[in-house]
Image (cartoon, helix red, strand yellow):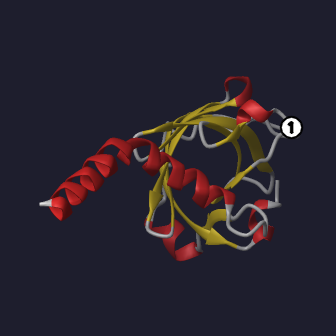
């Protein structure tokens, strides 16, 4: 009887904690382990993929957690990420910061300066990025709104840090 009560309480505790724990695991994934730096998640699309998807404008996309000095934007309840991408039409890397808050199994993110919004969620060892709107001002031009084309969902994989330092 006593074992059954412990199991039931453990199950109840797990059920009650499932929302924040899932969001916490996304923050943990973005924060890395052992103080080795924040992991980079990215993807560069090869010519074959782009030929199969002629409407896709993005040739490279990356996301990395950005540690900021504002304590309220540097923890599991609210954190900052940097997003960067390149388009077929040029060599410029567009980059913006976004503030993310836990939502379901992932996080809802709003870009700085009204650059748009997107959702991040765990996907295997990587991340799934679903864009509602994302248009970023670059050094010489502005990007189109990625959501107005075949650039709405990205499956990002763990990548070398250099992939995220390109912005």
Would residue 69 appear left or right of 38 to someone viewing this image?
right
Would residue 125 appear left or right of 74 to someone viewing this image?
left
Q: Position of residue 75 (x, y in %)?
A: 68, 42
Q: Position of residue 89 (x, y in %)?
A: 70, 53
Q: Secondary structure at mark 1?
A: loop
126 shown above or below 99? below
Dividing the picture into quadrants, the one containing residue 164 is bottom right
Would residue 9 appear left or right of 62 to someone viewing this image?
left
Using the image as rendered, state which of residue 76 and residue 58 is in the foreground.
76
Would residue 7 appear left or right of 161 to someone viewing this image?
left
Using the image as rendered, state which of residue 5 and residue 27 is in the foreground.
5
Q: Residues within 10 Å of mark 1 (few under 14, many from 20)?
A: few
Q: Going 73% across and 73% down the picture, which residue do you hit?
A: 160
85 shown above or below 35? above
115 shown above or below 154? above
145 shown above or below 67? above
> Can residue 152 be seen from the camera position used here?
no
Dividing the picture into quadrants, the one containing residue 117 is top right
Q: Position of residue 148 (x, y in %)?
A: 49, 36
> Can residue 132 be seen from the camera position used here?
yes
Q: Position of residue 40 (x, y in %)?
A: 69, 64
Dividing the picture into quadrants, the one containing residue 157 is bottom right
Q: Going 78% across and 34% down the picture, which residue do you hit?
A: 71
The quadrant of the picture occupied by the N terminus is bottom left
Q: Going 79% across and 47% down the picture, which residue do you hit?
A: 67
Task: Check disc 1 and report the residue beneath it.
Answer: 69
Direction left: furthest residue:
1
């Amino acid at each position: 009887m006593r074992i059954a009560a412990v199991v039931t309480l453990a199950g109840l505790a797990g059920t009650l904690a499932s929302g924040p724990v899932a969001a916490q695991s996304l923050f943990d994934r973005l924060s890395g382990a052992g103080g080795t730096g924040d992991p980079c998640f990215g993807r560069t699309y090869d010519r074959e993929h782009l030929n199969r998807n002629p409407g896709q404008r993005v040739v490279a996309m990356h996301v990395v957690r950005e540690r900021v000095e504002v304590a309220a934007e540097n923890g599991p309840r609210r954190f900052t990420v940097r997003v960067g991408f390149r388009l077929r039409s040029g060599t410029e890397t567009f980059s913006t910061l976004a503030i993310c808050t836990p939502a379901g199994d992932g996080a809802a993110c709003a870009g700085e300066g009204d650059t748009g919004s997107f959702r991040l969620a765990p996907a295997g060892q990587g991340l799934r990025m679903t864009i509602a709107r994302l248009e970023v001002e670059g050094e010489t031009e502005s990007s189109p709104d990625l959501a107005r084309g075949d650039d709405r969902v990205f499956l990002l994989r763990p990548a070398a840090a250099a992939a995220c330092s390109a912005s």
